[in-house]
Image: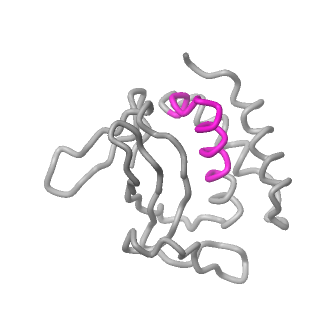
Amino acid sequence: MEFRPDGLYQHEPDSEGKLLPWSRIMDGIRLTWGKHPWSTNNRGLYTLKGMVAPRDGGWLHMTLRHPYEDHQLRFDQHTRPYRAVDTLRLEALLRQLTADGRLHVLGDPDWVGRAAACLAGGENRRITSRSLRQAVSEALAAAGPGSP
């Protein structure tokens, strides 16, 4: 999966892939882990150090419009394991951008770099709704307004 100026691009084996325009994404954004998208209740297995344990990658779930449908996009995990706190912060950022109607800023690599640097910083501390909101607010402020 790749963030592009015109939407999310899903790389698919043996095909050109598929573009999902930002304007189609409504809500229901969440991340799950594992080989299959139907493992929708699997929020992941984690190591004692707070890292996401499975190396299979995961799924970005969302609700689309025109036509209305639930949709999942597969993504691979980098060789470096993800911290659970970072994935939850990313999910919270995606939800906030969706609510604000600003998902298109994810197509700006500089904006994503600034937001990701802010989200990935900090301690692997207790995760609460309040701490996620605060992390997202700080990332949005650090990243700036982004391209229109």
Q: Quadrant of residue 36?
A: bottom left
Q: Is residue 99 rendered magenta in the image?
A: yes
Q: How is the image coloured?
A: one colour
Position of 136 relative to 83 (above/below): above
Q: In which quadrant is the C terminus drawn?
A: top right
Depth order, front residue of 127/82: 127
Q: Going by the image, does 95 lie left or right of 56?
A: right
Q: Where's residue 96, x and y in %?
A: 67, 41
Return the residue found at the far bottom: 48
Q: How many marks?
A: 0
Depth order, front residue of 90/110: 90
Which residue sits at x=62%, y=45%? 95
Which residue sits at x=61%, y=22%? 146
Q: Is residue 54 rendered magenta in the image?
A: no
Q: Going by the image, does 42 lie left or right of 117?
A: left
Question: Which residues are drawn in magenta?
Answer: 90-106
Q: Where's residue 119, x and y in %?
A: 71, 47
Return the residue found at the far left: 14
Q: Quadrant of residue 80?
A: bottom right
